[in-house]
Each structure stands twice: as C-alpha cells, then as structure tokens.
Amino acid sequence: MNNEQPDLHTEMKNQASTRDEAFAYLESLKGKKLKNLDQNIEATISSRQTKKMISGVAVNKSMNNGFTAEEHYLAAANVEGIFLMSKLHEWHEDKNENPGLEAIGRFEGSINLNGEVAIARLTLKKTTEHGNKIYSLELKELKKPLKVQATNSSNKLRSTSNG
C-alpha cells in the first residue's frame, strides 16, 4: 500500500505587501518558538534575522527568481506557517567554519501565492549557544500544481502534472 501524500501548500493567512507590514509581523514572532513538523524541531527569529529576511538582498533574490517585492513580503509575513509545513532539503556544515555554528539547514515549502504554487526556501542556522535560528527566506520558483487522483482499486494516490 502506498502512503504517499499530496503536497500541502501553506495558505497565506497574514497579509503584507510592504516592507513595514512584513517587519511588523516578523517582529511579533521575535523569541517565539516556531515548530517544524517534518524534523520535529523548533526555531526562533531574532531582530537580526527579521531584518535579513526583508533586506534588499533577500528581496532581490526573490525578484531574480521571477517574483515581486510584494510577493516576497507576503511570504515573509507567513514564515511561521511556511516553516511549520516545510520539508528539510539538506543540512551542511558552515563553509566559513564560524565558531558556534554547528550546521546550516535548507528547508523548502510549497505555498499558495496569489493562486499559484511557489517554492519558498528558508535557511536555518543551528548554533551551539542559541539553538535553531531561521536566518533567511527566498522565493525559489513557481510550480505547476499537482492534480491528485485516487485509483478505484485501492487508496493509492497518483500525482500528475497539470499542463
């Protein structure tokens, strides 16, 4: 029996279209423990990470991937839900060998962004002193939605690309 589940897309519950709106929401998360279901871990966001997530560099990365600044701010304002549902893409060592930095994790989650499915990538830093910190956010790409069909012979699910 195949237990494959369809992708669950994070709905954008919080609205933000400006840097200030995204900043206000992210500041409200400061110090709160955010959960990730895939790895059963918690992470926090500090003021430094808040500023990094909505920095010009972060917004430009998303814009270089075909998104608008407004879409980046909307995703940033929904980072709690994105982290909750995201899947671990990889853990790796810090190439700069910073003391106290155990590993860097890349998490990816699919999000419903203005009726389209997009991939959001979160970078998490695992530190010896402060635990897990969500460090940055980038919108990676638009994906074609998957159409899920149940077969009549069992409870198996089959995903097919629309288009």
Image: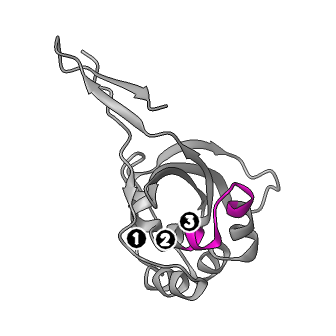
Q: 112 above or below 69? A: above
Q: Residue 80: give its label.
A: none
Label 3 Cα crowd, 10 Å radius (few <14 / some 14-19 / many 20+): many
Q: CA distance from mark 1 to mark 3?
A: 10 Å
User: Mark 2 and 3 residues: CB-CB less than 8 Å, in contact?
Assistant: yes
Q: CA distance from mark 2 to mark 3?
A: 6 Å
Q: Amino acid at mark 3?
A: Ile
Q: Amino acid at mark 2?
A: Thr
* Residues drawn in magenta: 62-73
Quadrant occupied by the N terminus: top left
Give percent across and percent down for residue 46.
56, 79
Quarter of the image for residue 70 reads bottom right
Res 100 visible: no
Residue named by callout 1: 33
Q: CA distance from mark 1 to mark 2?
A: 5 Å
Predominant secondary structure, magenta span: helix
Sooner in the amino-acid sequence: mark 1 or mark 2? 1
Q: 57 above or below 103? A: below
User: Mark 1 and 3 residues: CB-CB less than 8 Å, in contact?
Assistant: no
Q: Residue 134: give its label.
A: 3
Residue named by callout 2: 44
Give percent across and percent down for residue 61.
73, 61
6, 136: nearer the viewer: 6
User: Mark 1 and 2 residues: CB-CB less than 8 Å, in contact?
Assistant: yes
Label 2 Cα crowd, 10 Å radius (few <14 / some 14-19 / many 20+): many
| Residue visible at 40% across and 45% down in the picture | 38
Quarter of the image for residue 63 reads bottom right
Sooner in the amino-acid sequence: mark 1 or mark 3? 1
Q: Amino acid at mark 1?
A: Lys
| Residue visible at 51% across and 86% down in the picture | 21
Badge 3 element:
strand
